[in-house]
Amino acid sequence: MLESTRIKTEIPGPKSRALMERRHNAVSSGVGIATPMVAKEAKGALLTDVDGNTFIDFGGGIGVMNVGHADSRVVEAIKEQADKLTHSCFYVTEYEEYIQLAEKLNALVPGDTEKRSFFVNSGAEAVENAAKIARYYTGRPAMIAFENSFHGRTMFAMSLTGKTDPYKKGFGPFVPEVYRVPAPYAYRCPAGRDCSGGCQGDCFASIERAFVSTVHPSSVAAIIVEPVIGEGGFIPFPDFYLRRLRELCDEHGIVMIVDEVQTGFGRTGKMFAIEHSGVEPDIITTAKSMGGGLPIAGVTGKAEIMDSVHVGGLGTTYGGNPIACAAALAVLEAFEEKDLLARANAVGERVMAAMREIQDRHPDFVGDVRGRGPMAAMEFVTDAESRTPDKERTAKVIGGALQEGLLLLSAGQYGNCIRTLMPFVITDEELEEGLAVLGRAVDAAA
């Protein structure tokens, strides 16, 4: 076990409280803060605050640190690149790091079709550009997105997002011609079926009905999907559903955009979550763990689609910054050298087993355990029969775990899920202690 003395003060500690007070007076109150402490440094799967308290990190900066905090390859790549070239803007002068990263990403994404990539700064930007490209390529205006989805906070990405509070509340009017359909949420089946044995796909008919009652398929530029819904509660799309979606898009000439911002780079046990289904998307968006902590995002798609846009139609000042590209290249090296996909699957198996053990102890309020690989979640309810979301109990579990040195994040349409996004480099010892703390926190919330 790790040293039990790693928590040295109450949480938040005095230094954290002082800095949090300064934050209140300096930072917009519209910026939400999930955890009441101030970070100072981090390494691997451990994060230390300004008071010297060290936490096992099951949040990973919201899925950014798959290769771990301060990975040595990433750190050295950043330092080396900073000594050579920090910025020129790729649209002013090209540089090799950008081209090399595009080549590697084109080769990594699923499918044999020739690919093209370009880079921006965030997942939201990637989604914005994917939607823009799809509209340009098809000459059509409409987009279809799923309930519970999260695609970002910029205007088009926010319009595609399927959760109002806090992401969309008060920020309208939104981008027109965005249509929403139910997601295959087995625990809360939108078709009203008993999906306790797994999603039966009855909700797929909602897309076909939308083509009749809401928007004609000849007007639809793209359907955008997270293979595992992230912020909305870690809801996996069944493989057969994604394959049917691919067939539907092919039938109607619709671009299939797969948002892998949170699911990408090994989070589900494969480099990209869509690989589980065997589907080749038209466009994939990537970000988060791609940069190992630095801001970079990618839009990768079939060459015919990506090259359809006129010269100058795509671009951003900072996108594909040399330092961020160098970090992303180091991330890919780390995946190969450390065999991180195998490690991700091992971590995922242990996490799912531990969550199911917790559910077995508390079947009355741990309503569902789900996920794919180490992208796992528990959904809390007031009781098993009504399945009423229990946001308060969820917050109690997260707060109790934090006091014992475990950083957790919530998720879900109702804020009643706990998700795991730990770095894959977490040691077995750290993982077991973190899961033990999680179990005790759930027990205490009973």
Image (tube, helix red, strand yellow):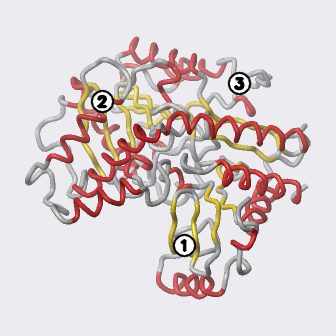
Q: Gap between marks 1 and 2, in whole Å?
A: 37 Å
Can you identify the residue that label 3 sits on?
191
Element assignment for label 2: strand
Q: Is residue 66 left or right of residue 391?
A: left
Element assignment for label 3: loop
Q: Nearer the viewer, mark 3 or mark 2?
A: 2
Can you identify the residue that label 2 sits on?
301
Say which residue appears at 58% left-offset and 82% top-offset. Answer: 20
The quadrant of the rendering that contains the N terminus is: bottom right
Q: Is residue 21 left or right of residue 108?
A: right
Chain-order first, disc 3 or disc 1? 1
| Residue closest to the far left | 93
Element assignment for label 1: strand
Residue 177 vertical position relative to residue 26 in the rendered view, above or below: above
Say which residue appears at 19% left-offset and 63% top-offset. Answer: 86
Residue 332: give x, y in percent of width and height: 36, 42
Number of other residues with Cα within 10 Å of mark 3, as a class: few under 14, some 14 to 19, many 20 or more: some
- The amino acid type of the residue labelled 1 equals Ala
Which sits in the foreground, 125 or 177?
125
Residue 282 vertical position relative to residue 77 in the rendered view, above or below: above
Which of the 4 quarters of the picture holds residue 111? Answer: top left
Q: Is residue 245 left or right of residue 17?
A: left
Residue 3: give x, y in percent of width and height: 72, 67
Please give the label number shown on residue 39.
1
